[in-house]
Image (spheres, rainbow, N blue to C red):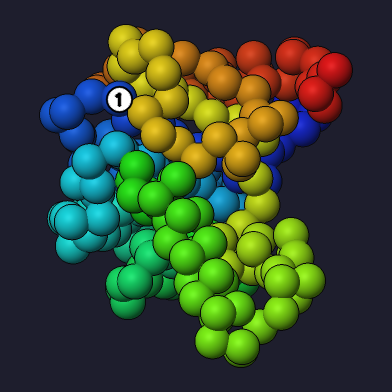
């Protein structure tokens, strides 16, 4: 990791395959934890990951034990809209690494934004808000105060982003991988190296 000049604060993993490997998704989470990446989003359009949180949680716990040992000093916190999720935590010598895992699907994209807009419009109609109260900051707060991903790993032979929220990835580097199945640590690190060699254009 010392060879990488920039470590993203947020990696998104878009799984474009119907057959999701929970073991391999869990490994990606643990590798991000190892790399010191504080946020990772696991996205599948159909929402299978959000519907199978317990299964994913179990695989993360197993992968964490395999990579860090059972006396882990790491903390994994799962997030999904509208759900209270378990967290996997450990402590050693008082030190704790921390990663936030955000589970997302197509319903968290434009449909969620439209729902927020309807809520604001109804509040204005009821006189609970004024139109000028609706600011970009307020909208962002409702969407979730999570940094936009600097890197998106698109897994599978897909030629779209499958409904991933477009406003989050205006400046995101996108790297395509053939599959997430049996993904090796070396392939994950190679993607980080590619990210380091690309010049971020900031919309130019």
* Image location of residue 25, percent across then percent down: 31, 39
Is residue 189 at least partly visible in the picture?
Answer: yes
The one of 112 and 129 positioned closer to us in this rendering:
129
Classify 193 as above or below 75. Answer: above
Report the residue that reaches farthest toward the front: 125
Classify 32 as above or below 135. Answer: above
Q: Secondary structure at mark 1?
A: loop
Task: Tell me: 177 left or right of 122.
Answer: left
Classify 139 as above or below 201. Answer: below
Task: Tell me: 128 left or right of 119.
Answer: right
Residue found at x 67% / y 31%? 170
The one of 183 and 130 positioned closer to us in this rendering:
130
The one of 125 and 176 positioned closer to us in this rendering:
125
Residue found at x 53% / y 62%? 117
Residue found at x 57% / y 21%? 174
Within 10 Å of the Cα at label 1, are there few (<14), some (14-19), or many (20+) other Cα atoms?
many
Task: Tell me: 65 left or right of 197.
Answer: left
| Quadrant in the rendering for residue 168 | top right
For label 1, the residue is 16
Task: Tell me: 15 left or right of 201.
Answer: left
Is residue 67 at least partly visible in the picture?
Answer: no
* Image location of residue 171, percent across then percent down: 71, 30
Counting every numbered tag in the picture gives 1
The one of 169 and 194 positioned closer to us in this rendering:
169
* Image location of residue 12, percent across then percent down: 50, 38
Residue found at x 85% / y 17%? 204
Q: Which quadrant does the N terminus fall into? A: top right
């Amino acid at each position: 990791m010392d060879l990488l000049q920039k470590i993203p604060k947020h990696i998104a993993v878009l799984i474009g395959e119907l057959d999701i490997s929970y073991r391999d998704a869990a490994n990606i989470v643990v590798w991000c934890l190892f790399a010191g990446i504080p946020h990772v989003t696991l996205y599948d359009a159909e929402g299978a990951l959000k519907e199978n949180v317990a299964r994913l949680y179990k695989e993360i716990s197993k992968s964490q034990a395999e990579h860090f040992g059972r006396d882990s000093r790491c903390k994994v916190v799962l997030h999904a809209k509208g759900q209270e999720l378990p967290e996997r935590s450990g402590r050693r010598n008082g030190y704790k690494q921390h990663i936030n895992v955000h589970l997302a699907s197509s319903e968290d994209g434009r449909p969620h934004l439209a729902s927020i807009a309807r809520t604001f419009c109804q509040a204005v109609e009821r006189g609970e808000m004024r139109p000028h109260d609706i600011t970009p900051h307020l909208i962002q707060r409702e969407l979730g105060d999570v940094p936009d991903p600097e890197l998106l790993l698109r897994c599978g032979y897909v030629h779209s982003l499958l409904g991933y929220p477009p406003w989050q990835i205006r400046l995101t580097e996108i790297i395509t991988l053939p599959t997430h199945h049996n993904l090796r640590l070396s392939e994950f690190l190679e993607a980080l190296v590619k990210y380091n060699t690309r010049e971020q254009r900031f919309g130019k």
